Image (tube, grey):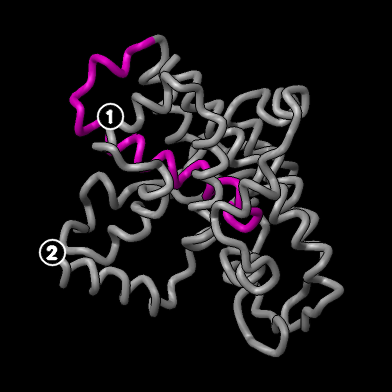
Amino acid sequence: MKKILLVLVLLVAVSPVAFAWGRIGHQAVAYIAECHLNPNTKAILLDFLDGESIVSTSNWPDEIRFTDEYIPGREHSKFGHSAFYTDDNKVIWDTKEPSAVIQITQIQDKYKDGKWRNYPREEVKRDIMYLTHAIGDMHCPLHVKRTSDTNPRITFYGNKTKYHTLWDNDLITRLNNWSFMEYEYMLGRLTDQQVDQITKGTVADWGEDIARYTKIVFDWVEPGCELNKVFAYKALPIANHCIQYAGYRMARYFNEIFK
């Protein structure tokens, strides 16, 4: 078991594949959410996750791709990690690729009004593990994919990379250098009125909110451009806000399903 875990850690560390927010970002979203769960919801999640925090499962849909358990065609290979919107920020419900917004909404409808009690324990557990990741994914501006958006190559502090990769991880790890607990300390101080404001609406509405940020951050770049401190310090507040919104919205989502 220790060897398997070591291989998993090494593969995640060296993989060139970019995942929204990276390990710390997803843990930060989940920890903000966990700190704002009501006690009953928190107890239910801990029970389904066999005593594990949602922080520990927040990267599972990414990490499973590097294990023997992952086989293309199985259900967990079809998890949606992105949200799809038109150029005028309207959700696309008929998508060829798996959509996080659609799947998160479907799970919400499936389990609402206590119906989660009617499903096998392992199915509910798998859905919870997916949700602890996917709600964070759909709040990354480059994971809201609008019809005409591309993924240009740019240079960030002298390093050539894809714009998607920059938003997935490089931006917050280079500039914040916070632990996942520090994110909650920094961003988890909203008033009840502020929380009500940012968590209102549907899952599709949340994605539309992030799609507006997607447009803003794409307006800042063109292929081959070089990004420096001027870009970094106007982009970072957007990244922080999106992580904050994701955490509070995840808490509301779980609190409503398991109320």
Q: Please check the rendered image and state whether residue 205 is part of the magenta-colored stretch, yes or no.
A: no
Task: Determine the CA span between mark 1 and mark 2.
Answer: 23 Å
The circle on residue 5 is none
Which is nearer the eye, 17 or 28?
28
The circle on residue 47 is 1
Residue type beneath disc 1: Asp
Q: Residue at x 41, y 15 (%)?
A: 112
Q: Residue at x 20, y 27 (%)?
A: 121
- Secondary structure predominantly adopted by residues drawn in magenta: helix
The residue under label 2 is 1
Q: Is residue 99 left or right of residue 252?
A: left
The answer to whether residue 144 shows anywhere in this view is: yes
- Sort mark 1 into few (<14), some (14-19) or many (20+) by Cα contacts within 10 Å: few
Residue type beneath disc 2: Met
Among all residues in the image, which is located at the extreme left? 1
Q: Is residue 73 left or right of residue 52?
A: left
Q: Quadrant of residue 177?
A: bottom right
Quarter containing the C terminus: top left
- Measured as percent of width and height from the top left, residue 238 is found at 75, 54
> What segment carries the magenta color?
114-143
